[in-house]
Image: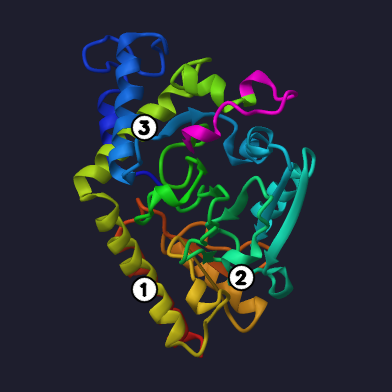
């Protein structure tokens, strides 16, 4: 979901962006107008996330799935080993891809309980010769998130933040590299944001394709090839919206309030059961199940008649998954909470 304010601005500027006589969809990525768009987008993101000066902001393509390859290709050094924390479907895919280029050690996993929790991590668990440590900060399918960022010492921490970037305040300096597909909280599908510490750039493995080398894009300010121009434009509008809202602190407060509304219904219910460990619950994806598959199907069917869409949970978890990303309004979550209470009263 995108903020309505953003969609209305894009609508107004669709045929004529600021007197240029054309849409952002139509202009050259080499034009001065678009250069201003991408520069402001990077600058605003730096401001919103308080990104230190020794980090580069890159606007790339290929989604987080391409980053599963780019990270090891660029960060594997002498040891060609990395520590990964396995917390779900996406971390498993990242592990599988990294294994193609070096050795992956899974230092912790929650697969033993179907990824319903985040493993407790200690600095001593990480191998001193690891080139990096990789985590997935939010797990959409299972409704879990890293509420505490692990301390990896001098080992660069890499994070896939595709489903919770910009949802709460984070200390970017704790990470060596952050990557995120934009389609949850930033822009339409097609854009990938990478925030990388400068000392990690320029060490790609010899076999790394030019387009998968962070240095290629860093040296050209994300304009080496034609970037996803319209997605970057929408991202800029979202960054402005977030900035005007009050930044990540205010966004985090709103997201916590939305999540609390649903978790309070679940925790005080005899019908619903949350699937994620309470201390590791996501504030982006609220997962829960009912006592029978028959009731699960009934809930999904009735919720659709009330205007709620895509509430059916992933097959590996079942039940329901309410995705309440940044642009989902508080009022919409209140209505969902109300529907859940009404459904329970009618199905005791």
Residue positioned 68% across, 47% down in the render: 94
Which span is picked out in magenta?
196-211
Q: Distance between the residues labelled 3 and 1?
A: 29 Å
Q: Tag 3: Cα neighbours inside 10 Å, few (<14), some, or many (≥20)?
A: many
Q: Was residue 197 drawn as part of the magenta stretch in this picture?
A: yes
Q: Quadrant of residue 343?
A: bottom left
Q: Position of residue 10 (x, y in %)?
A: 30, 29
Contact check, label 3 and label 1, Cβ < 8 Å: no
Q: Is mark 2 on a helix, strand or loop?
A: loop
The mark nearer the N terminus, 2 or 3, is: 2
Q: Nearer the viewer, mark 2 or mark 3?
A: 2
User: Label for residue 119?
Assistant: 2
User: Label for residue 260?
Assistant: 1
Q: Tag 1: Cα neighbours inside 10 Å, few (<14), some, or many (≥20)?
A: some
Q: Where is residue 110 in the image (x, y as percent from the top left)?
A: 67, 69
How many numbered discs, if any?
A: 3
Q: Tag 2: Cα neighbours inside 10 Å, few (<14), some, or many (≥20)?
A: some
Q: How far apart are marks 2 and 3 (CA)?
A: 36 Å
In the image, residue 256 above or below residue 293: above
Q: Is mark 1 on a helix, strand or loop?
A: helix
Which residue is more in the foreground, 334 or 228? Answer: 228
Q: Was residue 242 drawn as part of the magenta stretch in this picture?
A: no
The colouring scheme, among rainbow, by chain, secondary structure or one colour, is rainbow
In the image, residue 254 above or below residue 209: below
User: Residue beneath label 3, please?
Assistant: 234
Which residue is more in the foreground, 279 or 76? Answer: 76
In the image, residue 213 above or below residue 167: above
Q: In which quarter of the image is residue 238?
A: top left
The mark nearer the N terminus, 3 or 1, is: 3
The mark nearer the N terminus, 1 or 2, is: 2
């Amino acid at each position: 979901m995108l903020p309505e304010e953003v969609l209305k601005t894009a609508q107004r500027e669709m045929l004529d962006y600021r007197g240029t006589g054309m849409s952002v969809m139509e202009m050259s990525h080499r034009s001065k107008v678009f250069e201003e768009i991408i520069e402001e987008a990077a600058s605003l993101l730096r401001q919103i996330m308080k990104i230190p000066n020794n980090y580069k902001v890159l606007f790339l393509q290929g989604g987080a799935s391409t980053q599963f390859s780019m990270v090891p290709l660029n960060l594997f050094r002498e040891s060609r080993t990395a520590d990964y924390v396995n917390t779900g479907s996406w971390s498993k895919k990242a592990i599988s891809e990294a294994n193609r280029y070096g050795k992956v050690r899974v230092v912790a996993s929650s697969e033993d309980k179907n990824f319903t929790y985040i493993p407790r991590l200690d600095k001593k668990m990480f191998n001193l010769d690891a080139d990096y440590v990789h985590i997935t900060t939010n797990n959409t399918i299972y409704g879990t998130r890293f509420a505490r960022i692990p301390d990896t010492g001098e080992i660069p921490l890499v994070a896939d933040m595709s489903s919770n970037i910009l949802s709460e305040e984070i200390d970017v300096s704790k990470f060596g590299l952050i990557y995120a597909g934009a389609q949850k909280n930033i822009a339409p599908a097609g854009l990938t944001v990478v925030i990388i510490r400068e000392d990690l750039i320029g060490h790609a493995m010899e076999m790394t394709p030019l387009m998968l080398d962070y240095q290629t894009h860093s040296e050209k300010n994300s304009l080496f090839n034609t970037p996803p121009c319209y997605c970057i434009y929408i991202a800029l509008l979202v960054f402005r919206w977030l900035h005007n809202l009050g930044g990540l602190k205010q966004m985090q407060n709103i997201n916590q309030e939305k999540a609390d509304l649903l978790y309070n219904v679940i925790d005080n219910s005899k019908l619903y059961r949350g699937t994620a460990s309470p201390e590791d619950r996501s504030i982006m994806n609220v997962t829960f199940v009912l006592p029978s598959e028959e009731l699960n199907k009934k809930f999904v069917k009735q919720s659709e008649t009330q205007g709620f869409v895509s509430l059916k949970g992933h097959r590996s978890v079942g039940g329901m998954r309410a995705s309440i990303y940044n642009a989902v309004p508080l009022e919409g979550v209140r209505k969902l909470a109300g529907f859940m209470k009404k459904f329970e009263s009618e199905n005791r």
